[in-house]
């Protein structure tokens, strides 16, 4: 008979919250940050108030204090004895509300959760301005436990304030007092916890978590590696989190990782570090390496673990170096991409960053050649969706091809060979035009078209402005300055019995215009509105030349306004593919 790997222990909520306050109960690094919406916290309190069960807790006994992270933002007094595996969101909610504590949210901000209670009608709500001005509500129930008043004094104060707004009879007073007393008594609410044995490893704990909580977030290899970092290299874990936090907002002064392409998460930067340190894309393999496992013998070694973490530390320092980070962003801009708004795959960005760092640090590629090579690689990988399906497998293959490279020229040749193999003449002439036959508003081929227009300095259609100016992420407006516009409006196509979204919203039926023009055009067919716009351009010096260039860079065939719609789509897809190719060639 198999021995159970857990014990059942009963708690009252007050003891759990005291344990969190002291730090003896803590959040393990294989769990995620606080992600519940305030309404869900409100519902939790309502269920407890009504005496409903709210689920059991799952703890993991801890014999390595460094493996855990405390809930809240206070410094804890004791090392954790129990790590929360299941129940994090519930306990964090209760700790934050009943203790009046700020917590760290998913976006790294620190703020409180304020839940209100109406003891007249026994209703919970998320506090807002209207509720705070309603005398029937206790606007912040935290005050019942931390406000400095005893339960009796709290009830008396509430009744005094309520009488200022309307009369209360003895029956109502009794009901209100009972409701507040019942709310105050929630600190004695019973919980049952299952405590997993300390001898279990991360994989086994994760398996238990998934089996007993099918609605939970599946733990992955990045979670395990971040856990290992917390145990054996806490400084590295903190380094990642600090970098990601700083990347979210512009710095008031001095350099920072803020950019317009990506707000990275620790697990994303971890992938970069692993790629640079071990030339590996599969985190499962990297996890075993970092645990000190010999991949041939299967044996584990503490010395080997130390050596591997030293390699990861060196690679991570390179990855979070601000010079490297921002020079890489310049490579993306040199490839025509102005911001994350026109990048459909963050994997493409992250894995291209791995290659950039290897080229710069390991192979010593000079700056100019590296920027060109990385720009071409990113354009190719973004356009073809290289890292969309099975991204770990694909980057593992890409990195494996570099293991035989020993010089800058070897590195550049390896990248160039893969780019040339992906972007063949058949790809440009056949496959890409077919891929453009889509209505996806965030497709890689559409974004590559925008990037090419930026590289070719395309003007906005029928405008003095340029596409590059209006794709600038630093320019913010109430309404987007640049909009996609139906060249053949949907209402017109409907009148021609063309109703399929795939046809009416095909990306070949869109181009970029200034939003005022989009409003003016409305639902007129191109044969009606185009002549007026052409006259405005032709009336300028070199107007005929400007119009030809506009049509060329917007991939519009001659006489397009008079074309039959489906024939127009086919012709424009080929021209768009040609513009994308010209943009790509401009990188080199």
Image: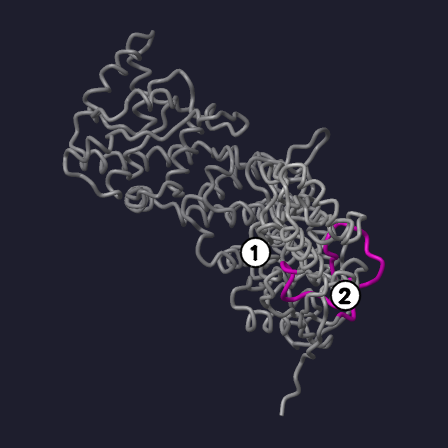
Q: Is residue 248 visible?
A: no
Residue at the disc numbered 2: 15
What's the distance in space between the residues labelled 1 and 2, CA to CA? Answer: 22 Å
Residue at position x 38%, y 43% from top?
443
Viewer-proximal residue among 412 and 65: 65
In the image, taking residue 35 as reference, residue 254 lies left or right, namely right
Label 2 sits on a secondary structure element that is helix
Q: Residue 189 placed where, x, y %?
A: 68, 65
Residue extent of the magenta highlight = 62-90
Residue 79 lies within the magenta run: yes
User: Which is nearer the N-term, disc 1 or disc 2?
Assistant: 2
Circle 2 Cα neighbour tier, 10 Å, few/some/many (<14 / 14–19 / ≥20)? few
Q: Residue 22 placed where, x, y %?
A: 81, 60
Label 1 sits on a secondary structure element that is helix
Quarter occupied by residue 539: top left
Viewer-proximal residue among 531 and 570: 531
Q: Residue 182 placed where, x, y %?
A: 67, 59
Residue at position x 40%, y 29% from top?
453
Residue at the disc numbered 1: 43
Residue at position x 18%, y 39% from top?
498
């Amino acid at each position: 008979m198999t021995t159970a790997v857990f014990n059942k222990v009963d708690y009252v909520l007050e003891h759990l919250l005291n344990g969190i306050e002291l730090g003896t109960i803590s959040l393990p690094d294989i769990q995620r940050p606080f992600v519940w919406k305030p309404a869900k916290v409100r519902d939790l309190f309502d269920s407890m108030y009504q005496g409903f069960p709210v689920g059991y807790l799952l703890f993991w006994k801890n014999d390595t204090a460094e493996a855990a992270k405390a809930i809240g933002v206070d410094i804890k007094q004791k090392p954790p004895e129990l790590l929360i595996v299941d129940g994090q969101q519930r306990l964090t909610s209760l700790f934050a509300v009943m203790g009046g504590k700020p917590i760290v949210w998913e976006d790294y901000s620190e703020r409180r959760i304020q839940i209100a209670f109406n003891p007249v009608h026994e209703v919970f709500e998320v506090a807002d301005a209207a509720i705070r001005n309603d005398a029937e509500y206790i606007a912040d129930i935290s005050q019942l436990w931390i406000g400095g008043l005893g339960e009796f004094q709290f009830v008396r104060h509430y009744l005094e304030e309520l009488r200022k707004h309307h009369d209360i009879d003895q029956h109502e007073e009794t009901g209100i007092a009972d409701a507040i007393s019942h709310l105050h008594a929630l600190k004695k609410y019973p919980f049952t916890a299952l405590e997993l044995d300390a001898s279990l490893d991360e994989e086994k704990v994760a398996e238990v978590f998934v089996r007993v909580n099918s609605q939970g977030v599946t733990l992955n290899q990045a979670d395990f590696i971040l856990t290992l970092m917390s145990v054996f290299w806490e400084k590295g874990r903190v380094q990642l989190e600090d970098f990601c936090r700083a990347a979210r907002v512009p710095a008031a002064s001095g350099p920072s990782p803020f950019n317009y392409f990506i707000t990275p998460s620790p697990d994303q930067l971890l992938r970069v570090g692993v790629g640079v340190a071990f030339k590996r894309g599969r985190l499962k393999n990297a996890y075993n390496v970092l645990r000190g496992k010999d991949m041939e013998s299967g044996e584990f070694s503490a010395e080997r673990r130390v050596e591997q973490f030293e390699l990861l530390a060196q690679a991570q320092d390179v990855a979070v170096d601000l010079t490297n980070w921002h020079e890489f962003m310049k490579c993306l801009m040199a490839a025509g991409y102005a911001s994350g708004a026109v990048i459909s795959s963050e994997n493409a960005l992250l894995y291209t960053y791995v290659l950039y760092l290897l080229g710069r640090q390991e192979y010593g590629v000079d700056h100019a050649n590296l920027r060109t090579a990385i720009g071409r690689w990113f354009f190719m990988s973004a356009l073809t969706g290289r890292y969309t399906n099975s991204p770990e497998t694909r980057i593992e293959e890409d990195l494996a091809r570099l293991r035989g490279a020993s010089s800058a020229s070897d590195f550049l040749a390896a990248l160039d060979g893969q780019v040339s193999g992906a972007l063949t003449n058949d790809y440009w002439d056949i496959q890409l035009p077919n891929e453009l036959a889509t209505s996806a508003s965030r497709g890689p081929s559409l974004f590559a078209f925008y990037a090419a227009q930026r590289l070719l300095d395309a003007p906005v259609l029928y405008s003095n402005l340029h596409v590059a100016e209006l794709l600038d992420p630093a320019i913010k407006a109430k309404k987007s300055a640049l909009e996609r516009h139906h060249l053949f409006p949907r209402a017109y196509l409907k009148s021609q019995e063309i109703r399929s979204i795939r046809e009416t919203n095909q990306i070949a039926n869109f181009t970029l215009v200034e939003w005022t023009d989009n409003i003016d055009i409305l639902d007129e067919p191109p044969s009606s509105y185009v002549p007026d716009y052409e006259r405005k351009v032709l009336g300028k010096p070199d107007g005929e030349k400007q119009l030809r260039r506009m049509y060329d860079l917007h991939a519009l065939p001659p006489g397009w306004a008079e074309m039959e719609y489906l024939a127009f789509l086919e012709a424009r897809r080929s021209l768009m593919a040609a513009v994308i190719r010209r943009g790509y060639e401009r990188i080199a």
